[in-house]
Structure formats: structure tokens, C-alpha cells
């Protein structure tokens, strides 16, 4: 799918800031694509953009209204429907990362068909994929992998893209989740791809390219997570990565959602991810460690990152606090 921008970010009646996680990500990484935010009565979230009406957003050049908020139960309320249909009538497409499809709401679907507008349900791929073939392809690829879920793989991938582009390097972020797709404007939500086709979808997402071009592929899950290891393995095989960046949150008490599972030893994590990646690219290597140290003070952050750097001989950074310059240095050095 390819979503037209500029965007209006729809926050609806979000009860709190956490509910606007998707809109926050888009506003952080693609602010220049956004003309403003649209909030309904009772909204308790903001992403720091100007508040606009639909009419004002269209006048400013908006092409798509992005549902950037998750509501209770994932259902699209009657109040939301009124806004979404009005957006279609004003010439906007709609994009959403909700589990509940826009196209499953009869009034919204019928309005889009009548007005010849596009509905993008980014969690749900709109095309079929071939199985992966593992054939070597040109170009360079970096995949972020994790010790667990939700440890910053998307953020790290985008930070590396920004750093590379600032250095004049040719690099593109390749989105594999719903928020990433809205940030990139296209991509594949691999957690909605039938398991046999995950590696093939990843090959399609990061095709052959020029030798000096980097695809920065957003990782998902963890090989050590009992629920989501399958999608992580499919990405490793399909990406054929030249480089891996391990993402981790020091001090996390257990695997996300699995209190009975401790986080893996990071040495084992690096070794297993490299071993799995070697199936389709024997040259794959880990080039850095990206940590979410939001739970640590300055001294704790320095201590944790220093210990990791000393243990593994790799740059260890917090992408939010320090940026990812040392990882890119190691990559191109």
C-alpha cells in the first residue's frame, strides 16, 4: 500500500496520551508530512501539532486522514464515523492501524466506494506474497532485532535512517508494523502475513538495490519470545541482513506479557540471531546495541551501556539520549 501525504492526524476522543501512540510516532518522525491534528470533544491527548478542522486541513493540502489513536475495544464509534465520512466527502483518503478495519464499517465502506476514495487498513496486507527463495540480492540491509518485544526496534531503525541521510548516505526505512507503515507511507504489516510467506514478504519489501544503498528493516518480536518468535525468524531469513542491531531494555523484569520467562542472556541473543541470519546471508554480523534506558538515571545509563560495550566490543547507545552515530560509524568503518 502507498498512502498519500500530507496527513491530518485524527486523535478522536482519546482518553489519554498513550491511546495516541500511533499519532505520536507519525508526528515525531514525519512532522513535515502533517498539516495538523483533529481532536473531538473529550480528547485528552495531543501530539503538539496545530488543531485543524477537516476543511482547514484540506485547504492546507492534506490528502489522507490518519486514524492515529486506539480506542476502547477497537470499534469505530458513530461519532467517529461521522468525521470519517465527512473526510471522504471532502476528498480525503482514510488510513488506520486499528484491528477493526475501516472497510468493515458499512457506512464508511459505502461512502468510499461512492466517492472513489481509498481506505488503507494498514494492519491488513492488500496483496499476496510469494514464499521466500533465499536468493542473494544486491544492496545492503540492516535489521533491528530484540531481546524482547517493544524494546525500540522501530525507533532505532528510524534513527539510523535519519543519521545515515544526514551523512549523505542512501538509506530507506522499511516498515513492518502498522505505525511504521504510516510513518513510511508504505510497507507490510508482517504480523498479518500467513506464516509461510513472511520471508517472501520481507524479500518483496526490501528488493535488490544499488550496492551503496541501505534498507533499514524494522524488526518485530524476538527469537526468545514464546509468542512471537516465528515472525522474528521469518524477518531474519527474508531480510538477508548484512548488519544486525540488537535492541534491549536493561532492567526489564521478564518477557513482555510472559511473567514466567526471563529475558535472555544478551550473548546468547546475539549468537542465535546471527546464526539464524546466516542461513540466507553468511556475512551477517551484529554492529551495535541500542538500549531503552528510560528507566535509568544518568549514572545508571552510563554504567549499563559501558558494561555492554566492554563485554561485546560493540557500540552501545540509547538512541533517544545519545543518537545512533556510533552504530553508523561501526557500520561504515
Image (cartoon, rainbow, N blue to C red):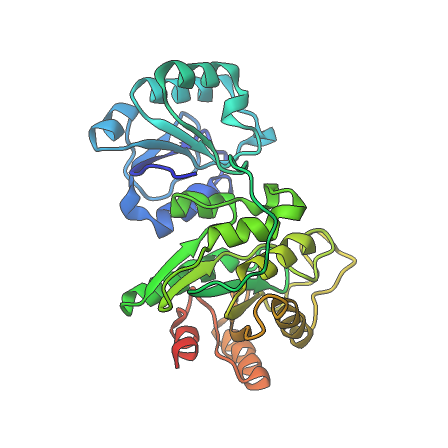
Q: Is residue 302 left or right of residue 85?
A: right
Q: Residue at x 40, y 27 (%)?
A: 118
Q: Is residue 222 left or right of residue 176?
A: right
Residue 279 vertical position relative to residue 18 in the rendered view, above or below: below
Task: Give residue 276's position: percent from left, percent from top.
Answer: 65, 67
In the image, farthest residue toward the right: 260
Decide which of 218, 194 is in the foreground and name it: 194
Decide which of 3, 32 is in the foreground and name it: 3
Q: Residue at x 43, y 38 (%)?
A: 1
In the image, farthest residue toward the left: 59
Residue 283 vertical position relative to residue 133 in the rendered view, above or below: below
Task: Quadrant for residue 65, please give it.
Answer: top left
Decide which of 119, 203 is in the foreground and name it: 203
Residue 152 visible (yes or no) = no
Q: Is residue 151 left or right of residue 63?
A: right
Q: How many marks?
A: 0
Task: Give residue 41's position: percent from left, percent from top.
Answer: 40, 25
Task: Give residue 207's position: percent from left, percent from top.
Answer: 45, 55
Task: Quadrant for residue 261, please give it.
Answer: bottom right
Task: Give residue 324's position: percent from left, percent from top.
Answer: 41, 70
Amino acid at each position: 500500500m502507498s498512502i498519500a501525504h500530507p496527513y491530518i492526524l485524527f486523535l478522536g476522543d482519546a482518553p489519554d496520551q498513550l491511546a495516541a501512540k500511533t499519532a505520536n510516532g507519525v508526528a515525531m518522525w514525519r512532522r513535515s508530512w502533517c498539516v495538523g491534528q483533529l481532536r473531538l470533544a473529550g480528547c485528552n491527548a495531543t501530539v503538539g501539532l496545530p488543531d485543524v478542522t477537516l476543511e482547514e486541513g484540506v485547504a492546507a493540502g492534506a490528502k489522507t486522514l490518519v486514524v492515529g489513536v486506539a480506542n476502547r475495544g477497537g470499534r469505530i464509534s458513530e461519532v467517529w464515523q461521522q468525521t470519517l465520512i465527512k473526510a471522504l466527502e471532502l476528498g480525503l483518503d482514510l488510513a488506520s492501524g486499528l484491528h477493526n478495519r475501516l472497510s468493515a464499517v458499512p457506512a464508511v465502506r459505502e461512502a468510499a466506494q461512492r466517492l472513489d476514495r481509498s481506505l488503507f487498513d494498514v494492519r491488513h496486507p492488500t496483496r499476496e506474497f510469494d514464499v521466500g527463495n533465499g536468493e542473494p540480492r544486491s544492496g545492503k540491509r540492516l535489521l533491528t532485532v530484540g531481546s524482547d518485544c517493544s524494546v525500540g526496534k522501530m525507533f532505532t531503525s528510524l534513527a539510523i535512517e535519519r543519521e545515515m541521510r544526514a551523512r549523505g548516505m542512501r538509506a530507506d526505512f522499511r516498515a513492518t508494523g502498522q505505525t511504521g507503515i504510516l510513518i513510511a507511507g508504505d510497507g507490510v504489516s508482517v504480523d498479518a502475513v500467513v506464516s509461510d510467506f513472511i520471508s517472501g514478504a520481507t524479500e518483496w519489501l526490501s528488493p535488490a538495490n544499488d550496492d551503496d544503498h541501505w534498507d533499514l528493516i524494522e524488526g518485530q518480536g524476538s527469537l526468545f519470545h514464546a509468542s512471537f518468535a516465528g515472525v522474528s525468524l521469518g524477518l531474519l531469513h527474508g531480510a538477508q541482513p548484512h548488519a544486525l542491531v540488537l535492541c534491549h531494555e536493561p532492567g526489564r523484569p521478564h518477557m513482555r506479557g510472559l511473567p514466567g520467562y526471563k529475558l535472555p542472556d544478551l550473548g546468547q541473543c546475539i549468537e542465535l540471531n546471527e546464526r539464524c541470519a546466516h542461513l540466507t546471508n553468511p556475512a551477517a554480523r551484529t554492529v551495535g546495541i541500542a538500549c531503552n534506558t528510560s528507566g535509568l538515571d544518568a549514572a545508571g545509563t552510563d554504567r549499563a551501556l559501558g558494561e555492554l560495550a566492554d563485554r561485546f566490543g560493540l557500540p552501545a547507545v540509547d538512541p533517544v539520549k545519545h543518537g545512533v552515530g556510533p552504530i553508523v560509524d561501526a557500520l561504515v568503518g
